[in-house]
Image: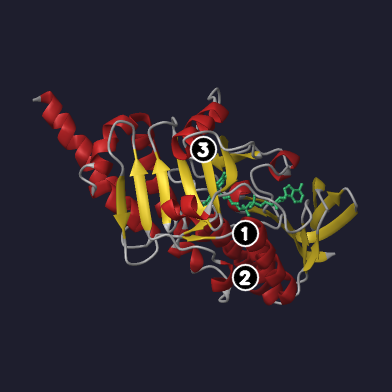
Amino acid sequence: MDDVIVIGAGPGGATAARRLAESGLQVRLLEKAAIPRVKPCGGALTDRALAWLPPDYSAVLQTHPYQWTCQAARLPPVTLTRPEPYCHIVDRPEFDAWLTRHAETAGAVVLTEHPVTGLKEEPDGVGVMTSRGPFQARYVIAADGGQGPSRRLLGLPRPRMGAALEVEVPVSPTFYDRFRDRVEIHFTEIPWGYAWVIPRSPILNVGVGSFRAEGLALKKMLDTFMTAIFGDLPPARTVRAHPLPYRHRWVPPIKGRVLWVGDAAGLMDPFSAEGIYSALVSGHLAADAIVRHLQSHVPLTHYDQLLRHTLGPSWKAASGMARIFYPLTAFWAPFFLENQLLLEDYLGIATQRTDYDTLRRHALAILWQNRVHIRR
Ligand SMILES: Cc1cc2nc3c(=O)[nH]c(=O)nc-3n(C[C@H](O)[C@H](O)[C@H](O)COP(=O)(O)OP(=O)(O)OC[C@H]3O[C@@H](n4cnc5c(N)ncnc54)[C@H](O)[C@@H]3O)c2cc1C
C-alpha cells in the first residue's frame, strides 16, 4: 500500500506529489494521458504563482508581457505599460512535464496512461482502480482537473462549469510583433467572460471563455473575435474546448481520506479564471496537511482551514467582484477604460501591488456613487 496516490499530473497533482515525496512519503502519481499532454490554457502565470514553483522556474517562462491592452465595445482600447511584467507565459505541456519531472526526481513513482476509473473508501485506506489494474493508498489527493471523474466516483456534486475555447495561431514575425510583450483582453463581447490574445513566441494563443457558457454560441464568438484580430479567419486550426470549473460558495475540499486540489476542487479564481495559482497552492497545502497528519496527528480537515486561510480571502473577494462586474460590463467599461482606476487595481493584483479587496471596495464605491447620482 502506498502512503499517498495522487490522481492527475497537472500543476496541482505534480506539486502535491513533489511535496509528499520530498517529505519522505511513498507516493504514486497516476496520470490518464501520456506526458507531455495538451491542456487548453493561456499559460499566464502571475507573480503570486511563481512563489509556489520549484526555484529553477525561469527556464520554463517563455514570454514576460509588460503591456496590457483592454478593450470594451464602443470605447477606444487602452494599453497600460509597466516597467515590470504583468505576468509570465508558459507552454502548458512543457510546464506540466517540468513539474512532473520534479515530482519524479523527488522520489514519486509516476505512471502515465493510467486513467483512474474507480475509487473505494476502505477502513484503513482508499482503493484506486485504473484501466491497468488496482492500487491502494492510505490517502488520495484528487487533482484530476475539470474533466476528471473523482468527485462523481465518490458521489459528490461537481463545481459549476463555465467553458473556454482556444486556438493556437502561428503568425508571421511582423504580425507577432504587434502583440509582442502584450496581452490583449476584450471584455464586453462575451457574457460572463472575456476574449484574449496571449503572445507565446512564435504563436498567439487566442481564446474566449465564459463562466456561464450554457446556451452561448462560443464558437461563433471565437470566430468573430478572431476576425476582429486577424482581419479574416486564419486558416483552419484546431479549436480546443475545456471546462472552467468554479464556485461562488466555499465547499470543504475533503471527504474522509480523499483531498481535492485545483480545478477538481473548483478553486479557480471566479473573476479572472486564473487557475494555475490555486492549483499550485492547494497542491502544496494538501500535501502539507497529510504530512502533518501522519507526523503529528493533526486532523486531515486542517487542509480545509489552511486553504481557507491562504486562498479564501482572495477567492471570496474575486467571487464578489464577479457577481457585481459580469452582469453590468457595459456599466463598468468606462470606469475601467476611461478613468482606469479599476483597471489599475485589477492589473495590480497580478503584480501584487494591490488585491481583490481593494478592487472590490473601489468598485462598490463607484456603484454607490452612481446610485446616489441616479436617485438625484
Ligand atoms: C482555455 C483556458 C485558458 C486558461 N488560461 C489560464 C491562464 O492563462 N492562467 C491560469 O492561471 N489559468 C488558466 N486557466 C485555468 C487553468 O488551466 C487550470 O485552472 C489549471 O490547469 C488547473 O490545474 P489542475 O492541476 O487542477 O488541473 P489540470 O491542469 O486540468 O490537470 C488535471 C490532470 O488530471 C488528469 N486526469 C483527468 N482525469 C484523470 C483520470 N481519470 N485519471 C488520471 N488522470 C486524470 C488530466 O489528464 C490532467 O493531466 C485556463 C483554462 C482554460 C480552459
Cβ of mark 2 under 8 A from ligand 1: no
Residue at image coords 19%, 36%: 368
Residue 209's mark? 3
Distance from label 3 to label 1 (Cα)? 20 Å
Cβ of mark 3 under 8 A from ligand 1: yes
Dot placed on the residue nearer the N-terminal end, 3 or 1: 1
Cβ of mark 1 under 8 A from ligand 1: yes
Residue 330 in the figure: left or right of residue 162? left
**Mark 2 lies on residue:** 292
User: Mark 2 or mark 3, which is nearer to you?
Assistant: 3
Q: Residues within 10 Å of mark 3 (few under 14, many from 20)?
A: many
Residue at image coords 28%, 53%: 344
Report if the CB atoms under discs 3 and 1 are less than 8 Å apart.
no
Label 1 sits on what residue type?
Answer: Pro
Residue 336 in the figure: left or right of residue 31? left
State the SS at label 3. Answer: strand
**Mark 1 lies on residue:** 11
Distance from label 2 to label 3 (Cα)? 38 Å
User: Mark 2 or mark 1, which is nearer to you?
Assistant: 1
Residue 235 sits in quarter: top right
Q: Position of residue 85 (x, y in %)?
A: 40, 63
User: In this rendering, is residue 263 above or below 51?
Assistant: above
Choose between 44 and 300: the one closer to the eye: 44
